[in-house]
Amino acid sequence: MTATRQVNTVLGPVSVNQLGWVLMHEHVIICNPGWELDARNTYDRERDVAAIAGKLATLLEYGVKTLVDATPIDLGRSVEYMVEASKRSGVNIIASTGLYSENRGFPSYFKSRSIDQIADWMVWELTEGMSGTTTKAGAIKVATGLGKIGQYEEKALRAAARAHKRTGAPILTHTDGGTMGGEQVDVFEEEGVDLSRVVIGHCCGNSDLRYHYGILRRGANIGLDRIGITYVMPDEVRRGIAMSAIAAGYASQLVLSQDTEGQIYGAPFFDSVAPPAEGAQPRRQRLYADMMSGFIPKLRETGVSERSIEACMVDLPRKVFGD
């Protein structure tokens, strides 16, 4: 009889059977690289950890037990904050190793490393500990830019593939504008990755169903994981994509998540990507429970079955993490 796979959370290993409902692509803390070099940027650690823990705790009211933090090292990943937030909130947090896109991250230190050297580092974070701690990552996060895969991004993709093959850890990706998902799959396929353990992120930035089905038919999973970021795509379109894919039998290959950040340090991260129009009201701080209180109930209202929703929120994470 095969033993049930254990998943690294920031508080230690947990059986995949104990993950429950999972948000597969969120962030506890996120910030632009270099924010800490501006001495004017300060934070109150106790206040901010308490606030993050409070936001996370609301997930338990909706039955969500686990959150995957998809923050790579170059977007301000903080092991300390994740550990403390998990302890205080009672929510499992699965951290990620990995690197972001060339234009917004990817430190020069790693640009000078080979694919296998980067893979070795990822394996270390998955098996020994992150950032000089004994807290282990449970997933791998990599990214590509808009309309192309850069030289260093491809290096990171291939390193992620090799680390995945050595550890079994799943791969989560970032895409810009719902582009390059198929090309990411091409790289992973060349490297011999188990595509059922890959989530191509932010596919909901693209409304073309041919894009989504092209990835799904190859066995990878797609992320409708920016729910609530309506300046990228209206949630009505995301619901349409979800309903179409579920009707076609792909419920267990759909990630429903929000890409929510509990705390942003330094300059607002997304304002440099999509600055608010002049005179517009400030954006409301999104909450981890927003999808559970809004998007999911609307799926139910449109006739999506509870079993199909559970396939997205429970079955897919168990599959991705290796059950």
Image (cartoon, rainbow, N blue to C red):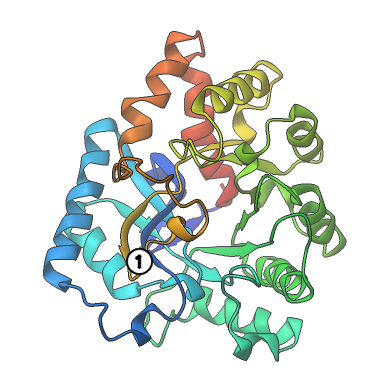
Q: How many marks?
A: 1
Compared with 298, 16 (above or below) is below
Report the amino acid beneath label 1.
Answer: Val
Question: Measuring 52% from the left and 43% from the top, which residue is drawn there?
Answer: 318
Image spot of residue 273 (x, y percent): 52, 56
Question: Measuring 36% from the left and 47% from the top, which residue is drawn there?
Answer: 66
Residues packed near mark 1 inside 10 Å, few (<14), some (14 to 19) or many (20 plus): many
Question: Measuring 59% from the left and 48% from the top, which residue is drawn there?
Answer: 320
Q: Quadrant of residue 203?
A: top right
Image spot of residue 239 (x, y percent): 54, 23
Question: Measuring 22% from the left and 52% from the top, which residue is drawn there?
Answer: 90
Image spot of residue 142 (x, y percent): 62, 64
Q: Which residue is mark 1?
A: 10
Q: Judge from the rendering whether residue 37 lies leftward or rightward of residue 91; answer left or right.
A: right
Compared with 81, 294 (above or below) is above
Q: Is residue 11 visible?
A: no
Q: Judge from the rendering whether residue 234 lies leftward or rightward of residue 211; answer left or right.
A: left
Among all residues in the image, which is located at the extreme right? Answer: 190
Most foreground residue, 168 or 154: 154
Among all residues in the image, which is located at the extreme front? Answer: 278
Compared with 94, 318 (above or below) is above
Image spot of residue 8 (x, y percent): 43, 63
Secondary structure of the residue carrying tag 1 is loop
Q: Is residue 231 visible?
A: yes
Q: Judge from the rendering whether residue 281 lies leftward or rightward of residue 278; answer left or right.
A: left
